Amino acid sequence: MISRNEIIQTIEMIDQQHLDIRTITMGISLLDCADADMRVCCGKIYDKITRLAADLVKTGEDIEAEFGIPIVNKRISVTPISLVAAGCAGGDYADIARTLDRAAAETGVNFIGGFSALVHKDFTNSDRRLIDAIPEALASTKLVCSSVNVATTRSGINMDAVRLMGEKVKKAAELTADSGGMACAKLVVFANAVEDNPFMAGAFHGVGEAECVINVGVSGPGVVHHALKACRGEPFDVVAETIKKTAFKVTRMGELVAREASKRLNVPFGVVDLSLAPTPAVGDSVADILEEMGLESVGTHGTTAALALLNDAVKKGGVMASSSVGGLSGAFIPVSEDAGMIAGAERGSLALDKLEAMTCVCSVGLDMIAVPGDTPAETIAAIIADEAAIGVVNGKTTAVRIIPAPGKKVGERVDFGGLLGSAPVMPVHEFSSAEFIARGGRIPAPLHSLRN
């Protein structure tokens, strides 16, 4: 039985502390859309997505109105297109991206993810065709998101793919120079990518998933920050317990919405991703949580330890609140999407190297980071390699979503609008990594990957 006090607490969290359902994401398998004719394949993709997701947005809006719970985004993820299109004899993979864009627009969703390839060990011909198409695909669409998995703990790091992705990130930025390199904000390079992630830009529908599934991503940095104000000066075990209890409440709300959406759409419920995903709004910041623990500014010494505590406590609290916790589940640290992170970068306490250290203990990696537009492709590839190494060695998901902002220099800002926010351009090391990246090949998997 839910008590009157719990109801009042939830209302306060929604009304005053930025608690929301960040996304309802419908995962759709497109494996049965494969065809040797590219035009036929595109037609099957469009028809299946618009049929299965026809009521997704309306259902989300109905639940939002009925329960009074904000649902910020309604999204779709699909089977990695490099798999779906592998049998196409010819044609441009960017045409498939434009088909996905039309289908997303028709259903009314915010984004569609899955223009993706899994190349952690090597490439198929289809993988290469898709990666070559990424810059044009993202530049010519509004709603399509792309991801490429270049490493796993079991396989090591495909350094040829890393080099290629450095080049594609650079090209994508150049093709969307008039919007600050916006295409790069829709492109993620992963290590150990998961199959049930509801969050963009990295969402895709894994081959081990059902035909169609509903995944929900919850968020509540503002709620956690508010809760910690009540235990100022308390020891860290009290801090951890407070975060756990708060994460439990947030996740229970996500479980309710997920099961309700699943029932109304007659689609299986997949997972609740209990990540703390910030927004540019003041009071909805992961950085604020870390500073509430006693740090003068995010990025100073102690930040990594504070983030480790936060990430662990969120997982422990959330996993008790749902029978199906999945996705990434933890704390995100996207610079452009977090007002506190932006402030830390601008005042000089938060640098790229410190962000890299923080990714050892957070949910994902270097996310929504703007760097100077003249940053070489090899430097971008080296940043991707460093982040992939953290993921591979630690057996966790890591990712890079980096924007070499055309024409921008250190200290300037690039504005993407909406939830993507605005990013201060951060410096990168001036010393070259070109010879390192030119080696290619594969960095072998670590010894502890051999667990058979």
Image (cartoon, helix red, strand yellow):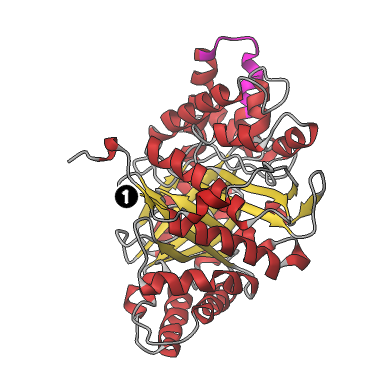
Q: Which residues make up the magenta segment?
A: 225-236
Report x, y in % for residue 434.
57, 52
Principal secondary structure, stretch drawn in magenta: helix
- Identify the residue shown where x is 47% and y is 32%: 248
Q: Residues within 10 Å of mark 1 (few under 14, many from 20)?
A: many
Report helix, strand or loop for mark 1: loop
Report x, y in % for residue 362.
51, 35
Asked if one can make out residue 202 in the rendered structure from this viewpoint, the answer is: no
Circle 1 sits on which residue? Answer: 155
Q: Quadrant of the C terminus?
A: top left
In the image, is residue 407 above or below residue 232? below
The residue positioned farthest toward the left in the image shown: 452
Q: How many marks are shown on the rendered structure?
A: 1
Does the magenta segment cover residue 21?
A: no
| In the foreground, 15 or 19 | 19
Taking the image as shown, residue 175 lies to the left or right of residue 239, namely: right
